[in-house]
Amino acid sequence: TQTHETDITEMVESVTWTGDITQAYRKLDVSLVNTQDGRRIRHKIELGDEIRFFNYGKELFRGVVFSLDIGINGKQSLTCYDYNVYLVKNEDTRKFSKVTASQIVRRLCRDFDIPTGTIEDTGYVIPRMIFEKKTLFEMMLMALTETEKQTGRRFFITNRQGRLELLERRKQVRQWVIENGVNLIDAGYSLSIEDMRNQIKVIYRGEDAQTITEIARNNRLIERYGRMQHVEEVNEEKTRSQLRQLARQLLNDLATIDDEARITALGIDEVTAGTAIYVKESMTGIIGGFYVSDDQHNFANGAHGMSLTLSATDDLPRLEYEEGR
């Protein structure tokens, strides 16, 4: 237990605060000058110490020092993660029967001494889940993915003031606008068909040497970009209509143009991974509503800037469950 608090603000040169919708935790990188006279260290900071970061009195981050280094000139850097990092630092083998995803989250947090805040009720009772050597985060994500498939309700895991929270993704009340001449600094937009596949061939080879093949194609994309085929081999027995459905589903996933927008803007504390924003930038054509898939906030010399990767879709991380895998 920590017995005292030390304010190290005046030693800090810069802070970078980052998050990504696919990550369990947020990260804080701190650069500081930890000496007054150039000969001795000013404050001993150790691995496992708790770090809290405030912007204008509002707590943005609370976490643990996971790595640090210091040079002969007293310049020191710290890498800290919020308490959700323990979701990926612990793995286990577990079996759950007739429980909701929120009950799974509560039980795992209790068993691994992870403090919790608000845990919203996910409602759907999952008949059975068996996990072999999965991280706590993987188990939670699989339970939430199963819930979404059954109910359409989407939940996400976050951490506030050192406590894990499970919240439902609801319509965002406040819409942040980022535009030329106001708060936008830079923008870029990229498009790629590198990973596109516009024809899918699904093959099932039965034990009796019978082969069933189903093909799904997007003729419009084939005509425009040329044919690009993906082959999927299926081991477990499926009917022709199940194979057709699988081919259509794969086509749906793979027959897409990858697009990514990146913007740099004046910092807004509330705009983090998972937030919706509205962007108006005419040269790149980034106009409309987007979701932030990852964010980087930089604080230095009294200024706060942010770099965001944007996505047109609200992609919360998903992890499909397969029994015992």
Image (cartoon, grey):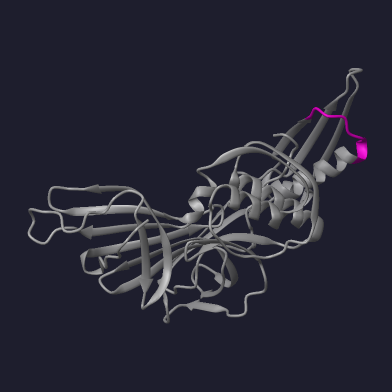
Quarter of image, res 32: bottom left
In the image, taking residue 25 as reference, residue 221 lies left or right, namely: right
User: Which sits in the foreground, 272 or 110?
Assistant: 110
Q: Would residue 134 be visible to someone looking at this image?
A: yes
In the rendered view of the protein, which quadrant contains the C terminus?
top right
Which residue does the image show at 43% across and 69% down from the upper left? 60
Report the front residue among 311 and 197.
311
Residue ID at (37%, 71%): 54
Q: Position of residue 287 (x, y in %)?
A: 57, 73
Q: Relative to 186, say whether 70 is above or below.
A: above
Q: Depth check: 193 or 3 in front? A: 3
Residue found 53% across the figure and 51% down from its top: 113
Q: Nearer the viewer, residue 159 or 27?
A: 159
Can residue 185 be seen from the camera position used here?
Answer: no
Say which quadrant the N terminus sits in. bottom left
Judge whether 53 appears above or below 239 on screen. below
In the image, taking residue 173 as reference, residue 201 lies left or right, namely right
Task: Indicate whether 181 appears above or below 118.
Answer: below
Label total for image: 0
Q: Position of residue 125 (x, y in %)?
A: 80, 54
Answer with left or right where residue 79 lies relative to residue 203. Answer: left
**Residue 26 spot, x, y in % from top left:** 47, 57
Magenta highlight on residue 270: no
Picture quadrant of residue 237:
top right
Q: Which residues are magenta?
A: 234-241
Q: Is residue 257 left or right of residue 63?
A: right
